[in-house]
Image: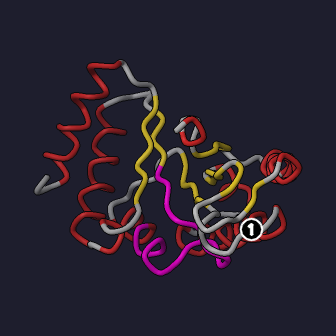
Amino acid sequence: CSDAASTAAAYQQVITKYGLHAIDFDLEEPEYENTAAIKNEIGAARILQQNNPGLYVSVTTAGTADGTGWFGKQMLLEAKAQGFTPNNFSIMPFDGGFNGAASQTSALTNFNKILQSTFGWSEATAYAHEGFSGMNGRSDPGEIFTQADFQTVLDYATSHNMDRFTFWSLNRDRQ
């Protein structure tokens, strides 16, 4: 769509048709690298949050060892510029050299610091707006996320009162 309002209107049709209570904006490549696309998606998320009281809005982006990369940081800055705070900002710490829970929890700690510095939040407030979206089993480049890793990251998320803990994707292993 050409602007945030048009993008929001398109998403609103889906929200209305299916009676959704939550929506996740998964911002990745190639749109991730397009400033206009990010502005529209963040703007649409903001509009939907305003127009749908009680709608849980999350924004998910790629994870890196540093938390998120340059484009993820630009997305956060766009959200801040628009005065938009979703219920949650999540990272996907996979497909980037993540092997085991230690590398993923380190990325979550680093992402928390990015949220703190971007929005001026305390550590606790940043964790209350932070989430994890992992990939179960084997990722595309062959990283392994075991059940033990899952438990370790879940314990980390719980102990830090993180807002969201999900995995990608239920249907992936059925294909």
Residue 85 or 20: which is nearer the viewer? 20
Q: On the picture, is 29 further left or further right than 170?
A: left
Counting from the top left corner in percent of width and height, residue 110 is at 70, 73
Residue in the picture at 58% in, 62% down: 140
Residue 69 or 159: which is nearer the viewer? 69
| Element class at badge 1 | helix
What colour scheme was applied to this rendering of the protein? secondary structure
Residue 21 lies in magenta, yes or no?
no
Counting from the top left corner in percent of width and height, residue 61 is at 49, 61
Q: Amino acid at mark 1?
A: Thr
Mark 1 — residue?
109
Q: Residue furthest front?
A: 175
* Magenta-colored span: 59-75
Residue in the picture at 29% in, 55% down: 41
Above or below, 39 against 155 in this view is below
Task: Determine which quarter of the picture holds residue 37.
Answer: bottom left
Residue in the picture at 42% in, 37% down: 23
